[in-house]
DNA sequence: ATAGTTATTGTTATAATATAACATTGTGTA
DNA sequence: TACACAATGTTATATTATAACAATAACTAT
């Protein structure tokens, strides 16, 4: 039986793979139009092609959007099957972003209840400060 | 001695006041161009006039930007002198946003250290889920 | 195999969000 | 009064993101 080129394990499609590879090798968050510029040599010509791949990659947790920067990074956790509980530290000088994977932080936030006793299904946390190098 | 029209206590300038008033009476986060549309009758004609007022209002903690929505709400805490430690709950259906003021949450996050022992000077947290009405 | 279904791609145009640059006026301070 | 700084006005432009439509590729279930 022939192996499918695209199966249930979220194997990436051509555009998704091209764009993921670029984000993955980028040392800092990369913006949509910077991605577009970089993949034009691979035949991806239009913003929509980029945004569609980004949407999918975010949906399956391979990348995350840094909301305060409108930029994207590869998941550094290898455990974010879904982007529903994310935390990052962002250096305000060099713009380096690190994904925080702290069991106690995620436990605290996942279990957090507001004053009405309400729990939430998803969160995104961005810390700001200066990274080691920039202090 | 004459009382200054604009003093150190962050009294708002004309445009800042107009725009703050609008945001303050808005029941949900409002976007920059919706603000622009609403204040044109008051003589504010250009996006830059809106964005400049927004920048200042954010800086002094009178409003906050909801990053995932590119929209602005008035501070609901009356204690955010500066926008450096913010947390919100966002309903994914009706888009209602509530500012969370939980002493234990802010204490936890303000004191949070990453695995390098690093503390951060600022954070923004957005929780997502369904509000009471939408469940 | 094959029809039906869904995901992905390609393409053009346009919407929505945000800033640059420059000139001018208002305000607080000394 | 002079200086410095904050705020305003204005035009143009940059950046980020989506709408709408058509075509192809891949998966599902007979
Ligand atoms: Zn991740
Ligand atoms: Zn840094
Ligand atoms: Zn506040
Ligand atoms: Zn709701």
Image: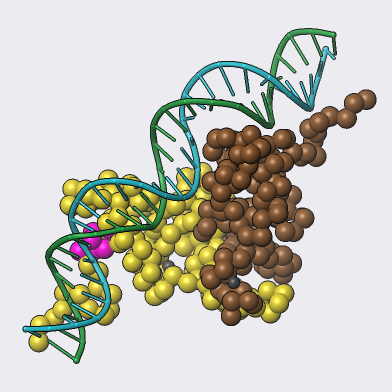
Chain colours: A brown, B yellow, C green, D cyan
Q: In front here: A101 or A23?
A: A23
Q: Quadrant of residue B20?
A: bottom left
Tell me the residue at 47%/51% (across/down): B69
Which quadrant, please, contains the C terminus of chain A? bottom right
Question: Residue lying furthest right in this view?
Answer: A1
Magenta residue span: B14-20
Q: Quadrant of residue A97?
A: bottom right
| Front-most of residues B11 and A39 | A39
Based on the picture, tell me whether residue B61 belongs to the magenta stretch.
no
* Residue B16 falls inside the magenta stretch: yes
Predominant SS along the magenta part: helix
Q: Position of residue A29 (x, y in %)?
A: 61, 57
Image quarter for ligand 3: bottom left
Identity of the residue drawn at 66% across and 65% down: A98
Q: Is residue B72 visible?
A: yes
Give the total number of marks visible in the rendering. Answer: 0
Residue A71 against residue A135 in the figure, above or below: above
Which is more toward the observer, A132 or A89?
A132
| Residue D11 x, y percent position in the rendering | 23, 47
* Residue A76 at x, y percent in the picture: 72, 59
Taking the spot 27% from the left edge, 56% from the top edge, the residue there is B49
Q: Position of residue C20 (x, y in %)?
A: 36, 58
Q: Residue at x 88, y 30 (%)?
A: A3
Identify the image quadrant of residue B72. bottom left
Answer above or below: position of D29 versus A73.
above
Quarter of the picture holding the N terminus of chain A: top right
Left or right: residue B82 versus residue C22 is right
Q: Is C16 positioned to the left or the right of B108 in the image?
A: left
Q: Nearer the viewer, residue B96 or B34?
A: B34
């Amino acid at each position: 039986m022939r192996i499918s080129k695209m199966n249930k394990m979220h194997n990436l499609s051509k555009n998704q793979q091209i764009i993921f590879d670029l984000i993955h090798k980028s040392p800092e968050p990369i913006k949509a139009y910077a991605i577009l510029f970089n993949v034009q040599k691979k035949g991806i010509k239009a913003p929509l092609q980029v945004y569609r791949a980004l949407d999918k990659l975010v949906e399956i947790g391979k990348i995350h959007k840094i909301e305060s920067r409108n930029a994207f990074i590869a998941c550094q956790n290898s455990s974010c099957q879904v982007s529903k509980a994310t935390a990052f530290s962002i250096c305000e000088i060099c713009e380096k972003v690190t994904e925080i994977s702290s069991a106690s932080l995620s436990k605290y936030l996942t279990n957090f209840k507001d004053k009405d006793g309400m729990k939430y299904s998803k969160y995104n946390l961005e810390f700001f400060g200066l990274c080691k190098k920039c202090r």
